[in-house]
Image (spheres, grey):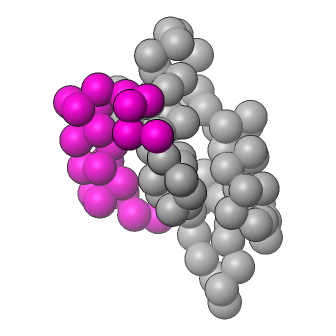
Amino acid sequence: MASMMEYHVVRYIVRKALRLQVDEAMVSFKDSIKATRFIRENPNFLVVTKKGMLYCGICGRGPFTRRGLYLHLMRVHADDIARAIESRS
């Protein structure tokens, strides 16, 4: 991952997509708007729900708990998410 700021934006987006508790002070207001727009425009990019179970929207692995999918996305796909944010912003 290129920078610590990018890491915080990715973390914020993943937590928002999974409806986990988010610290709004983690990112700037501008980045929070960008994150909300990214999630709204790409609803199944990070999380896919099949029969009530959570699956990774990038690689299809699962099923996961919300916390398990958060860990998977941050450990395996953080760079992919950062690139997607930059290319779609």
Residue at 70% in and 79% down? 53
Residue at the top extreme, as displayed = 3
Residue at 77% in and 65% down? 64
29 sits to left or right of 68 = left
Which image quarter holds the N terminus? top right
Taking the magenta stretch, the answer to whether it contains residue 18 is no
Residue at 50% in and 10% down? 3
81 sits to left or right of 60 = left
Residue 13 percent across, percent down from the top left: 45, 44
Residue at 66% in and 44% down? 73
- Above or below for 82 versus 33: above
Instruction: Name the one closer to the observer, 79 or 4.
Output: 4
Q: How many marks?
A: 0
Instruction: Name the one closer to the observer, 24 or 71.
Output: 24
Instruction: Name the one closer to the observer, 67 or 48.
Output: 67
Which is the main secondary structure of the residues drawn in magenta?
helix
Which image quarter holds the C terminus? top left
The answer to whether any part of residue 7 appears in the image is yes
Q: Quadrant of residue 68?
A: bottom right
Residue 15 percent across, percent down from the top left: 53, 49
28 sits to left or right of 5 = left
Residue 61 percent across, percent down from the top left: 76, 60
Residue 88 percent across, percent down from the top left: 29, 37
Give the residues in magenta.
23-45
The answer to whether any part of residue 87 appears in the image is no
